[in-house]
Image (tube, helix red, strand yellow):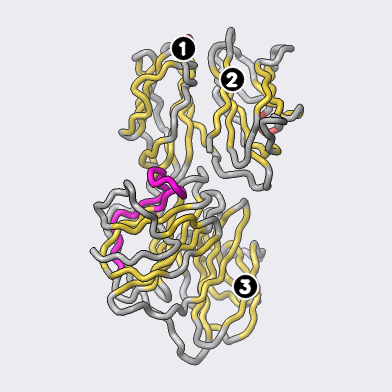
Amino acid sequence: MKLRLFAPLLAAVAAAPLLLTGCGGSSDDGPGYVRLVNATSTYASLDLYDNDTKANAAVATNTVGDYTTIGSGSYTFYLKPAGSSTAVASAVQSVSDGVHNTLVAYNTSGSLRTRYLSDNEAAPTSGTAKFRVFNTSYEAGNVDVYVTAPTDTLTNATPNAPTIGGERFSTYGEITAGTYRIRVTAAGDETDVRLDIPSVTLTDQQILTLVLTSTPGGVLVNGLLINQQGTLQAQVNGFARVRLVAGASASGTVAATVNGINLSSGTVSTGKPPAIGSYLQVPAGALATSVSINGTDVSPSGLTAAPGADLTLLVLGSAAAPQVALISDDNSPALTSGYVKLRLINGVNGLNSALTLQANNGVLAKSSNIAFGTAGDPTQVINSTTASPTPLEVDSATSSSALYTGNVALLTPGVYTLFMLGDAAAPSAVLRLDR
């Protein structure tokens, strides 16, 4: 199979091959055209206004509106939740005669943002398709994109599009028409797959943009395949990432399987090294979960995982009195330069007390009074160095003495969890760099 290599590209999740068609650029005289792509996770439906005129109505998440005809000139485009009179974003853009444009709305860095795309890229060479990637996700960070034959592995492969940063485009590249597999990985690590499209058919003179968007966990990505002046196909990630934290009392042995993925065949709680597993990808949705403590089944029911979520399966207590919790993890990086993110998880068996985390000699409000089996929310903390580490302290509501004190270098970029595990008679603290 012939493949032309090119700079910054793509990836996603689908079960069946995709046949993607679109059209090339246009130089026709006449009015301009604008449409909206709703790539947000926070607005189920958006209206697009040009000045005071509604151009697109009720564009649902992961869909595209029809082109509306607009005369040439400068316009202020407003985004409003469908049916609302309140704008949530605005952008001043120009419209030229005969030119098609797409306004992409997306979420990143804790805010709603837009990017205005011209849909008049010239057609590629006969027998090829043009392809590029727009990575909207600050959360996902730099990614590599591979376009390969469907059965190829990534072992020793060279990315077609290396190191595409957040809110960055690749250039267009030409690929011989045919069927390919597209994978997005962490930059420099082909084993860390963030999105996988098993089979995509690129057609003769197609012009395609893959838009990558953020997920709840901040690591995996979703995709939108947008044909120039044509259709959109959403590629919602079908996976979540789950890790096991074994914190059973009396150093109990914990085993767990989620949706057929073995998280551990048997991990000794509070063992050496600490009983905190690595994230593994599992199919999202309802979770068929099997958990045991010392060989006794303690499996929970009714657990679910949102597509793209990062989750901690926390197993505490004893076989006779188990406590199993599925905790959502926000592994997106800190929004403020020079800061890291830090939170507390309370897994101390038999303490019967809430815990509070201090950093830099101040209480972290979002990790204050954390009950047994629960987690605080991540808090931004200024980064430190090995020469000037951050003082950390964990206090119990029922004790005048700290359960843990330490001085730790919290280094940017970093997302940290301080786990308090073990039994009340001898609690242990484990600081884990989650990302």
Relative vertical location of residue 250 with respect to residue 178 in this rendering, above or below: above
Q: CA distance from mark 3 to mark 1?
A: 60 Å
Secondary element at tag 1 = helix
Position of residue 117 measured from the top left corner of the image (x, y, whole percent): 52, 72
- Which residue is under mark 2? 429
Residue 191 is one of the magenta-drawn residues? yes
Residue 207 is one of the magenta-drawn residues? no
What's the residue at 49%, 48% (across, down)?
Answer: 215
Which region shows up in magenta?
Answer: 184-202
Relative vertical location of residue 13 with respect to residue 18 in this rendering, above or below: above
Q: CA distance from mark 3 to mark 2?
A: 52 Å
- Observer-nearest residue: 97 or 81? 97
**Res 285 seen here:** yes
What's the residue at 28%, 70% (across, down)?
Answer: 177
Identify the mark nearer the N-term, 2 or 1: 1
Position of residue 330 measured from the top left corner of the image (x, y, whole percent): 55, 40
Q: Tag 1: residue type?
A: Ser
Position of residue 297 measured from the top left corner of the image (x, y, whole percent): 35, 18
Q: Tag 3: residue type?
A: Phe
